[in-house]
Image: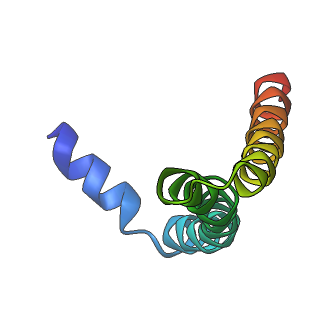
Amino acid sequence: MMIQSSIDFYLQDAIQKIIDYQFETTYKFFKNLALLYILGFCVPLLIIIFENDPVYNKYCYIVGYFTQLIFFCVEIIQMRD
């Protein structure tokens, strides 16, 4: 009985449109966050692993540090909301 009422609730047009809109807007946001994480943290980490030059390593550590700082600030903002 409870399962059927939940299914009926989610099949309503207005609710489905709200869910679709939220999915589309959050998809874009989280896609950008994932790209930032991959390009700003994972790629520099891979460069550090495979490159032995201290100059490259220093720059990669700095890029990774600032990327993590951005993600930390995003988390702080989300905790305040």
Q: Residue 15: x and y, percent? A: 53, 64
Residue name at image x 14 percent, y 40 percent: 1
| Residue 15 placement, left or right of 26 | left
- Colour theme: rainbow
The quarter of the image holding the C terminus is top right
Residue at (66% x, 55% y) in the render: 53
Kindly give the residue lying farthest to the left in the view shown: 1
Q: From what the image shows, is residue 33 above or below residue 45? A: below
Quadrant of the rendered structure where residue 17 is?
bottom right
> Does 17 appear above or below 15?
below
Residue 45 placement (x, y as % from top left): 57, 51
Residue closest to the eye, 31 or 43: 43
Q: Nearer the viewer, residue 41 or 4?
A: 41
Residue 21 left/right relative to 79: left
Q: Is residue 11 left or right of residue 2?
A: right
Nearer-the-camera pick, 11 or 23: 23
Q: Residue at x 19, y 51 (%)?
A: 4
Disc count in the image? 0
Q: Quadrant of residue 9?
A: bottom left
Instruction: State the residue in front, 66 or 73.
Output: 66
Residue, x 85% and y 23% (percent of image)? 80
Q: Is residue 72 above or below residue 38?
A: above
Q: Residue 13, position in %: x, y? A: 49, 76
Indicate the position of residue 55 as horizontal and vertical percent values: 78, 53
